[in-house]
Image: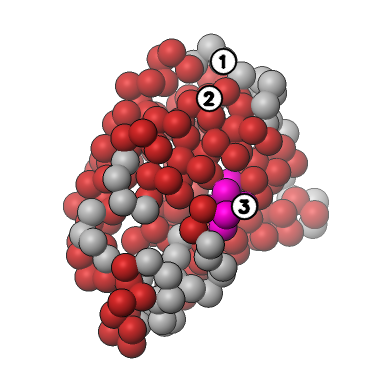
Amino acid sequence: MDNKKLVEILQATAKRIEAEKAFLTELDNEIGDGDHGINLARGFAAVEKKLPELADKDIGAILKGVGMALVSSVGGASGPLYGTAYMKAGAAMKGKTELTPDDLAAAFDAAIGGVQMRGKAHEGEKTMLDAQMPASKAYKDALAAGKDVKAALKASVEAARKGVEYTKTILATKGRASYLGERSIGHQDPGATSSLMILEEFEKAL
């Protein structure tokens, strides 16, 4: 994957988040502040505006620029979390003009590390990590088993989808949803859902 393909993926992601804005907001109305879709769509609209000036830069700089655009334009928890994820991935990919399948795994791990650092969360707490961490593991496991990047991304998306379903069954212990206690069970996490959507756009593009 080169920088041109990455820009294509980011443009597709922005359009997907805008299209799903109402659905993500509806999910967040049930267990959060009711602003996840609105905020994330605003952030990716800012990303889309910034992409033309990032397009000729290396992959690390593009990802860092995306992260900065998200942090500076998104309120609530999702801006700092996603912004930090993209910035950490950018730092890990600094100077690269193409990504190998292994680079993609390293970028994914760096992004997750950023989310964990910023959100002080772990898998199993009904957050975006419940989609991201199984997705990363499935991707790396598929590569280790000799699968190509297409098959590895398919496995990653399937794991994220299962992770989203898993969030319906567990108690929220982080963020606004944690205030609901037992009433948070039965609802899927909006952040895990938007993480799945972002991964799906990667899989479609590659």
Boundaries of the magenta span? 111-117
Q: Residue at x 29, y 31 (%)?
A: 45
Q: Which residue is drawn at 45% across and 49% down?
A: 81
Residue 189 figure quarter? bottom left
Residue at mark 1 to residue at mark 2: CA–CA distance:
6 Å
- Left or right: where 117 falls relative to 168: right
Amino acid type, residue under disc 1 in the picture: Lys
Please check the rendered image and state whether residue 42 is part of the magenta-colored stretch, yes or no: no
Instruction: Check disc 1 and report the residue beneath it.
Output: 57
- Left or right: where 81 falls relative to 2: left
Q: Earlier in the sequence, mark 1 or mark 3?
A: 1
Instruction: Check disc 2 and report the residue beneath it.
Output: 62
Q: Earlier in the sequence, mark 2 or mark 3?
A: 2
Q: Which of marks 2 and 3 is in front?
A: 3
Q: Is residue 101 visible from the viewing direction of this image?
A: no
**Residue 191: horizontal and vertical position, in percent?**
39, 58
